[in-house]
Every structure is written in structure tokens, then in C-alpha cells.
Amino acid sequence: MMMNKQAAILIVGNEILSGRTRDKNAYFLACALKEIGVLVKRIVVIPDVIGQIATEVNTLRHAFDYVIVCGGIGPTPDDVTRPAVALAFGVPCEPHPEAVRILHDYYKERVSARRLVMAELPRAAALIPNPNTGAPGFAVENVFVLPGIPELVESMFAHVAAQLAHAPFVELEFPVALAESEFADVMDAAVARFPAVEIGSYPSCSAGQWCCVLVVKGADAAQVQAAKAWLHAAITARAEAMREGH
Amino acid sequence: MMMNKQAAILIVGNEILSGRTRDKNAYFLACALKEIGVLVKRIVVIPDVIGQIATEVNTLRHAFDYVIVCGGIGPTPDDVTRPAVALAFGVPCEPHPEAVRILHDYYKERVSARRLVMAELPRAAALIPNPNTGAPGFAVENVFVLPGIPELVESMFAHVAAQLAHAPFVELEFPVALAESEFADVMDAAVARFPAVEIGSYPSCSAGQWCCVLVVKGADAAQVQAAKAWLHAAITARAEAMREGH
């Protein structure tokens, strides 16, 4: 069975930490990575501070198969992710010839020294094309760097996904009409019975009504199906027993 | 001048990492903390794994004035945040007499051993009242632990906020009708001129139209006002010069 690769997402941005902007990128990336069976195991949001970004990139790239970084690759002084990633890898941040060409083609006579700052990348970075606004993202080894603007992240991610190892991963869920405490022991039994399957219970409240969703997931589709069927039958039996007052 | 305290937010939940659920709590907390001048400097999302939670809590509680933890304090087997925080502090996780009493009062004859699991807390924890569903959150030293359900987090946060040190913090912003590269040098000058003020530029795209917002913030209201006025005047002059073709 193919193993699922594990990824971390690093969001760089004071505007997320301050609550000025509600992050969309971590959620988009978590969903998009799960689609291809890459499992996100850590999300970190940090300020636009060069040393912190470099330290975090180095921690994450050694701990995970892939690191997806979003934010801070524009031309203003608060955009420091490009030199920070260069620092993390111990390479110079310098004009990338292909990125320079792309920016010249995109801006034509409006190209400027300031705009060309966006072509200063860690040496030997591979480019991630940006079909909307020219300035590319880039990858160094297992670190993929995208802008912070969600529309751009979404349009650029397909190019990243194509470079990652895909593997099957199945997630099933069903609603439960009991309180968590009324079926938690059934979950205990399922956890013991299906060790390769991850099982979670998610209560939520909508318009004053509480409900609960059980989520069953894993790399082995047959095991996930079996665990779901077993849990569903056991919880249905529990609900009937409770209705009959046992 | 009062110093702003710094906080980290720790979100515990497989459902956030997998993209099943879009996190609301980090955004809510970032906004609510900024309201009282507590500055969020790190947000981390990790799985429901007891050792990882304990390690992360210990890292964050030593690095920040406050740590707000959300998620994993219910009664199902994937709820491991209570014992994890006890592990982090090296204290037993045991029935908390006041929490036990609260759950008895809330559930009355429906109380059960399973429900009482939610009263097993790190020894000497202080309770955070839960006006909606009984089961309290808790605090140990500078670590405040809340549930994962956003409605509960929002109703319980006021009690946490009352225990944190409040301080002034001002954030101003204004829209700019230029591309970032056209005023980035003005930002450089402002950064040099107002070192105590944080300045950020946030481009966004709405219905195909690009616009940019400049954000100016800091603890010293007079400095923030001055920086905003200076930047606004300088960028307005730049825009006029560009219109006249200089």
C-alpha cells in the first residue's frame, strides 16, 4: 500500500495574526492536499519577520515531506519571504533569469527596478507559474512558496500538486442523533477494533440544535468502509436501545 | 507607555488539518485579543495527539505571555487535550471537585461516568465557565483551554479576557489606488521614519479589480496617527505626480 506523504503549511502574515484578514489559504490547501492524499499535519502562522520565517522553514522542511509557504513575496518592504527562504537554505537571494524575463514580458514598458525585486529568488529555485499577475512563486527542494492572495494561491496550486506524490486516502462520515457521551464507549471499541483507521466525533450547534458527525478515515479504503459500517450498526443499535429505555 | 502582551493560539484538531472544518476560532481570538491590546504572534494547528499537544503547550507557554488553546476537551476518545495539558505541566489529570459539581447540576439524572470525564482536569486548574453546555474550560498558569466549538469559544472568551492585561493598541488603514510597486519606496521611507510603527500593504482582488490597503499600527496612538498622515500625504503626491506623467 502506498504511504500518504505528510505536509506542513506555513502562513506568513501579520494581517492574519492581527485578525485584520481571515486566512483562506490554509483551508484551501488542506482540502486540496487531501484530494491527492497528502496529509497536512501542522499549520503555522507567523509574522513577516525574516529570521522567524527562516527558522520555521528549516524546522518544517526537515520534519515533513512537503512544506507549502504562503505570503510575503510581493514588492513592498513587509514582503520578506523570498530572502527568508534563501537564508533558510543558506543560498543567495538574487535575480532569477527566467523570473526576470517573465516580469519583463508581463509588465513590458511598465517594468521597474521595484517590480524586478519580485524576481530576486533563492539561487536555483524552480519557478511556479502565476497565470494572473506574472510574478512567479518558487520551490527549493521540498519547500513550495506561493503568494498570500487567495485567488493567486488557487490558480498556482495545480502546478505544485503535479509535483507531489499522490496516494489514495478515504474519508467517510455520517450524522449521529445521540449526544457524544452516549456513544463514546462505542467509539472506544471501534478505535480498538480498527487501529489503522482514524475516528473523530464533531459536535456542532446550528440554530440552537445540537448534532454530531462521525468521521472515519484512512489510507485503506476497505478498512475505512468496514469501520464505518461497524460503527454505524453499533450506534444505531445503541440509539434503539436508548429509545426502548434499556 | 504600557507594553502590549504577546499571545499564541494553539488549535487542536484533526478536522482542521484535514480541511473537513474551516477553523473559525483562531480568527475570532485574533480579533478579540487585539481589541484588548494583546498581540497574537503565533498560531499553530496540530493533531489530536497527546504527546504533540503537551510538547507544543510547553514550547508556547515559555515563549509567550499567554497561550489560548482550543479543541479536544469533550468526552470522546479523540478528545485528549485535558490529559495533554496535565502532562505538559507534570501534574495529574483528576476529577476537579467544582467541575464535577457543575456537571452534576447541569446534567442532573442524566449525568454519567462518561460525562464526568469532562471534569477530569489538570490538578489545581482554574475553571472557565461555560454558560451553554456546562462542561467548563480551564486555565493553568498562562495557558487557557477552551473547547473547539466556535459558539462555545465565543461565549467563554469574556471570562478569559478579564484575566489578561489590557493595553492600548491602534490600527489605522486607508485604501491606495496605485500598484504596490508604484509606492513601495514611499513605504521604505515611512518604515525608516516611524520605527515604532508597523506598516503593511495588502493587495486584494475583487471581481477582477485590484486594490490595495495600507495598514499602520502600533501601541503609541500619536506615532500611528503621524505615520498614517505622512504616508497618506506622500502617496497622494505620488499618485498626482503619476497622473501628470512625471
Image: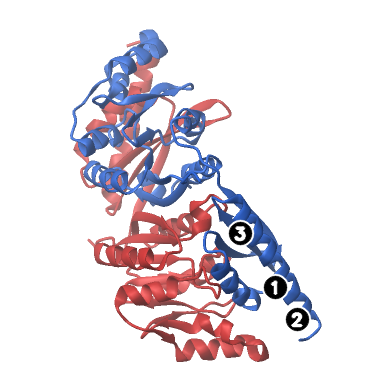
Chain colours: A blue, B red
Quadrant of the rendering where the N terminus of chain B is positioned: bottom left
Q: Using the rendered image of the protein, determine whether residue B162 is visible from the camera's viewpoint.
A: no
**Where is residue B195 shown, x and y percent of the image?**
20, 43
- Read off the residue under disc 1: A178
Marks 2/1 in contact by CB < 8 Å: the verdict is: yes
Which of the labelled discs sits on residue A202, or is there none?
A: none
**Where is residue A237 shown, x and y percent of the image?**
75, 74
Q: Name the element at disc 1.
A: loop
Between the residue at mark 2 and the residue at mark 1, the CA separation in whole angstroms equals: 10 Å
Marks 1/3 in contact by CB < 8 Å: the verdict is: no
The 10 Å Cα crowd at callout 2, few under 14, some 14 to 19, many 20 or more, is few
Q: Name the element at disc 3.
A: strand
**Of the residues shown, which amino acid type is indicated by label 3?**
Val
Q: Name the element at disc 2.
A: helix
Between the residue at mark 1 and the residue at mark 3, the CA separation in whole angstroms equals: 15 Å
**Of the residues shown, which amino acid type is indicated by label 1?**
Leu
Marks 2/3 in contact by CB < 8 Å: the verdict is: no
**Where is residue B124 shown, x and y percent of the image?**
36, 85
Q: Chain of mark 3?
A: A
The 10 Å Cα crowd at callout 3, few under 14, some 14 to 19, many 20 or more, is some
Q: Using the rendered image of the protein, determine whether residue B36 is visible from the camera's viewpoint.
A: yes
Q: Where B74 sits versus B105, above or below?
A: above
Please state if A94 lies on the left or on the right of B85 as rendered: left
In the image as oriented, which residue stretches furthest toward the right? A244
**Of the residues shown, which amino acid type is indicated by label 2?**
Met
- Read off the residue under disc 2: A242
Q: Where A196 sits versus B87, above or below?
A: above
- Read off the residue under disc 3: A215
Q: Residue at x 51, y 68 (%)?
A: B78
Are callouts 2 and 1 both on one chain? yes
Name which quarter of the figure residue A126 lies in: top left
